[in-house]
Amino acid sequence: MHSFAMLLKSFSGDAHYAKRLLESFAKFNVEGIPLFIVVPESDLEMFEAMQVQNCTLLSEDLFERHLVDQEVHGIRPGYINQEIIKLAFWELELAANYFCVDSDAEFIREFRVSDFMFDSLTPFSVLVQDLELAVDPEYYHQYWKSREREIARIAQLIGWESPVILTCHGHTVLSKKVLESFVDEFLVPRGWEYRDALEQSPYEFSWYNIWLQKSCAIEVHPREPWIKVFHSESQHLEYLMRNITTADIARGYLGVVVNSNYSRGLGEVSASDSKVMNLAMMVNYGDLASVLLHKAKRSLKRISSRSN
């Protein structure tokens, strides 16, 4: 069993993202950290063709007894099954600690085991409030309010009483010790499977994080996220307009995600693309015409004021 590894759960629909991720993984993985890629049995051949060094491809059939074939909490089976696989991966005894990385991530600088592990046995834990997302009107109305309720539900069920609930969206290290404790001490006494917990609240990382803090199964060493995530187009546009490049982002983060939930319809959006390329994908001709017209009016107004 590896002390530390990475886990990617993907499928054919995200293969183009996964290919980009694997290329960045191979480029910046200076210590040969292993990566396990879990995909549907039918997608194995497709992903076999894009494997890089230090990768092991696994069929999601290994988790068959846990997987669902119908909606859970109103969410399609494919999405719930990727959450289940992240929670259940420890059962394969391939890694004592594993960093869950999404297909739409890109690594942007070298990374090492020491970036993720406090010591040889204990991982760092991403535990944050993400209050800047409550400030973002777009994210607040679309996601924040419902997510806040769902996470409070997890805390209530676990019995975690705290005025400040810390968790993360993803891209964190999951510990086998914590998850084994979660199963033995929380799920089993209730006669639950992973799917039953997700039926109550479909946030796998918050189930992990709140149980981590409640159980003290391992020492908690909190840190800020490793991955910069653009959750919405407005967040990405803000960085572009401020001319913040991936070289700038790399001073604080190991990688970046342009969330495919909003960017999928724009094509393969990469944070490493130029400002012009990214803006060209995001701004439509109507918006561009309005901007040009507005700039022209302001220029004429300035010229007029000077002449007077």
Image (tube, rainbow, N blue to C red):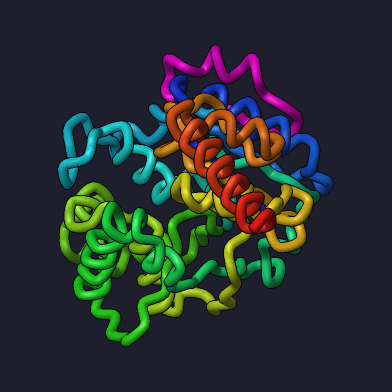
Q: Is residue 123 above or below residue 94?
A: below
Which residue is at a point 71% across and 36% down the rendered structure image? 274
Q: Quadrant of residue 209?
A: bottom left
The C terminus, quarter of image: bottom right
Which residue is at a point 43% across and 29% down the rendered structure image? 286
Magenta stretch contains residue 48: yes
**The residue positioned farthest toward the front in the image shown:** 308
Asked whether, in this view, residue 97 is left or right of residue 187, the answer is: right
Q: Is residue 225 visible?
A: yes
Q: Quadrant of residue 191?
A: bottom left
Q: Is residue 211 above or below residue 268?
A: below
Which residue is at a point 52% across and 75% down the rendered structure image? 218
Task: Estimate the x, y position of residue 137 in percent, counting from the top left.
Answer: 35, 60
Task: Estimate the x, y position of residue 234 in percent, counting from the top left.
Answer: 47, 50
Which residue is at a point 54% across and 29% down the rendered structure image? 281
Number of numbered tags placed on the structure image: 0
Q: Is residue 91 visible?
A: no
Residue range highlighted in magenta: 38-57
Q: Is residue 265 above or below residue 84?
A: above
Q: Nearer the viewer, residue 292 or 154?
A: 292
Task: Estimate the x, y position of residue 113 in percent, counting from the top left.
Answer: 74, 57
Asked whether, in this view, residue 279 is left or right of residue 61, the answer is: right
Asked whether, in this view, residue 13 is left or right of residue 192, the answer is: right
Q: Nearer the viewer, residue 149 or 274?
A: 274
Magenta stretch contains residue 53: yes
